[in-house]
Amino acid sequence: MSDQLDGNDDTRYTEIQACLEKEWEAKCNRCGACCGITDGDPCENLETLPDHKYSCRIYEDRFGVHKTLGGRTFRCVPLRWIINQQWPGDHLCAYKEKPQNFIINSREKTEDRTGSADEGQ
């Protein structure tokens, strides 16, 4: 057997990754906390939307060194890199919400709210 993916597997993998990325992006509630709106000195590229949510003017090119409105320099990084850290207003971030339908208990079992359980691995 070959350890390499054939063309169909490679295509399927790419499709799955695109789907997962779309799901991840859809979790954002546009609170602006990760962009500094709650600490009073947000990124200069953060814009307020008509529904009082926030968006990045340069979203596709956001990673790298930028400035806040006050002139402070910072590095914009993928949220996945810092999701385990804290920042002002992070309690507003949908990415930091714990899943409501699963509970992990001390015996490494995952239980859903209906009471069925699957053994953890």
Image (cartoon, rainbow, N blue to C red):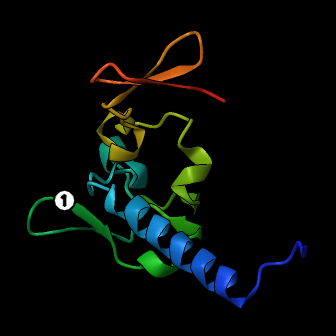
Does residue 53 lie above or below 94 as drawn?
below
Task: Give residue 35's quadrant in the image.
Answer: bottom left
Q: Which residue does the numbered mark 1 point to in the structure image?
A: 53
Front in this rendered view, residue 73 or 55: 55
Residue 104: give x, y in percent of width and height.
Answer: 49, 20
Residue 76 x, y percent position in the rendering: 55, 62
- Residue in the picture at 52% in, 54% down: 79
Quarter assignment of residue 119:
top right
Q: Is residue 48 left or right of residue 73?
A: left
Residue placed most toward the observer, 6 or 96 = 6
Residue type beneath disc 1:
Lys
Q: Is residue 116 above or below residue 105?
A: below
Q: In the image, what residue occupies the spot 50% across and 13% down? A: 105
Residue 7 visible in the displayed image? yes
Is residue 31 rendered to the left or right of residue 80? left
Instruction: Residue at 54%, 68% (x, y): give it.
Output: 66
Query: SS at mark 1?
Result: loop
Quarter of the view holding residue 113: top left
User: Which quadrant of the figure contains the C terminus?
Assistant: top right
The residue lying toward the viewer, choosing from 80 and 121, is 121
Residue farthest along the left direction in this orientation: 51
Say if 34 sits above or below 24 in the image: above
